[in-house]
Amino acid sequence: MADTKKIIILVGPPGSGKGTQAEMLADKFGLFNFETSKIIEEKFKNADPSDEVIATEKENWKLGKLVTPELVFEWIIDRVKELASEGKGIVFSGSPRTLFEVENELPIFEELYGRENIRAVNIKLTEGESVKRNSKRRICEKNRHPIPNFSEFENITKCPKDDSPVITRLLDNAETIKIRYQTYLKETEPVPAFLREKGYNVLEINGEQSIEKVFEDILKQLDYGQ
């Protein structure tokens, strides 16, 4: 059932399954799956090669560091306003990622969608499990569909959903993943605490369970009555 007044914010470290859960929630509730990383990758891909600022941001991003929050904020809000004007609800799996973003994005989200329609979910995962999962992570080249890390998918080279090539991202090597996890602890982990301070009930989910169990727990705690 589509709900144009819904925003669900998923927070969690690399490998916590945010993207997979966002896709499942988007399908269930008719929401737009807002992939911040996809927007960033598209911006870098289409950027003017002579733009030194973007070139520097891209290099830092490849090393597992976050893109400058002010720049990400600008890209995100432009798209959110478009979606709100189209009457579309949103599930976020990569934003807000910093205190700067949540402090500046939340008032706009509340204005566009209403505070009562915004929910937040914090998916917990240890560093060891993050490295283990991401080192084996693959996605499809065209639409970034995650390829499950199960034996039946081990040898596939084409995405089951859109037939595009299956690839491993540059960010998904052990050393970069460790940097990304520490970056998450420093930059993103404060986000749920900020939301709680603002009176939001942040749902805590054990991300080390199966995909299905994580989804089941999220639905149970969201309690939308569906």
Image (tube, rainbow, N blue to C red):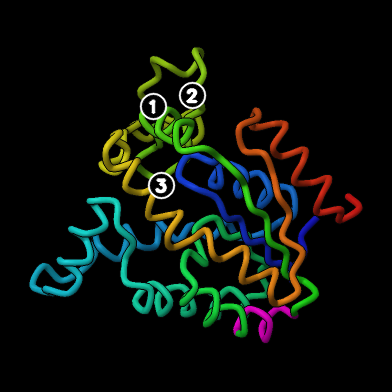
Q: Is residue 110 magenta?
A: yes
- Which residues make up the magenta segment? 108-114
Q: Are marks 1 and 2 in contact (CB under 8 Å)?
A: yes
Q: CA distance from mark 1 to mark 3?
A: 16 Å
Give the quadrant of the N terminus. Answer: bottom right
Badge 1 density bin: few <14, some 14–19, many ≥20, Cα 10 Å: some
Q: Earlier in the sequence, mark 2 or mark 3?
A: 2
Q: CA distance from mark 1 to mark 2?
A: 7 Å
Return the x and y of residue 33 as percentages of the image width and height.
Answer: 57, 56
Q: Are marks 1 and 3 in contact (CB under 8 Å)?
A: no
The image quadrant of residue 130 is top left
Disc ID at residue 136: 1
Return the x and y of residue 62 as percentages of the image width and height.
Answer: 23, 51
Task: Determine whether 110 is above or below 207 in the image.
Answer: below
Q: CA distance from mark 2 to mark 3?
A: 20 Å
Return the x and y of residue 100 as percentages of the image width and height.
Answer: 46, 77
Dot 1 amino acid type: Lys
Q: Which residue is mark 3?
A: 181
Secondary structure beneath label 2? loop
